[in-house]
Amino acid sequence: MTRDEDRSKFVKLASARVTKALKDIQLIGNLANRSNYDYTPDDVTKIFKALNEEIAACKKRFEPSNKKAGGAKFTLE
C-alpha cells in the first residue's frame, strides 16, 4: 500500500469510527433524563471514569513515544 492509500484508509476509518463514537456518547447523555431513568451520582462517576480512562489509553497509543522502536529501554538513573 502506498502512503496515499494508507492515508485514505485512515481518513475513511477514522471518520466512520469517530462519528459512531460521538453518536454513542450522545446516547449515553440521553441516560441523564430522570423521567426515564433512575441512577446515582456513583453511577455517573463510574460511567465518566470508564470513558475518561479509555480516552486516555486511546490517546496514549497515538503518542510517538509509544511506537515500537527497538524494544524496551532500561536505565538505573
Image (cartoon, grey):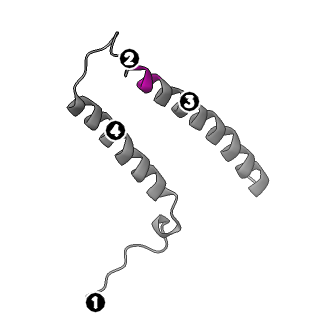
Q: Amino acid at mark 1?
A: Glu
Q: Nearer the viewer, mark 4 or mark 2?
A: 2
Which image quadrant for residue 40? Answer: top left
Q: CA distance from mark 4 to mark 2?
A: 16 Å
Find numbered disc 1 in the image and state the secondary structure of the residue it sits on. loop
Spot occupied by residue 6 in the image (x, y as percentages of width and height): 71, 51
Q: CA distance from mark 1 to mark 3?
A: 44 Å
Q: CA distance from mark 2 to mark 3?
A: 21 Å
Q: Residues within 10 Å of mark 3 (few under 14, many from 20)?
A: few
- Which residue is rendered at x = 52% and y = 58% of the image? 62
Q: Amino acid at mark 2?
A: Asn
Farthest residue, direction front: 35
Query: Total number of numbered labels?
Result: 4
Residues at discs 1 and 4 in contact (Cβ within 8 Å): no
Q: Residues within 10 Å of mark 4 (few under 14, many from 20)?
A: few
Q: Amino acid at mark 4?
A: Phe
- Give the prevailing secondary structure in the magenta stretch: helix
* Front residue of 16 and 7: 16
Q: Which residue is mark 3?
A: 20
Q: CA distance from mark 3 to mark 4?
A: 18 Å
- Which residue is rendered at x = 47% and y = 30% of the image? 25
Residue range highlighted in magenta: 27-31
Q: Which residue is mark 2?
A: 33
Q: Which residue is mark 4?
A: 48
Q: Which residue is mark 1?
A: 77
Q: CA distance from mark 1 to mark 4?
A: 37 Å
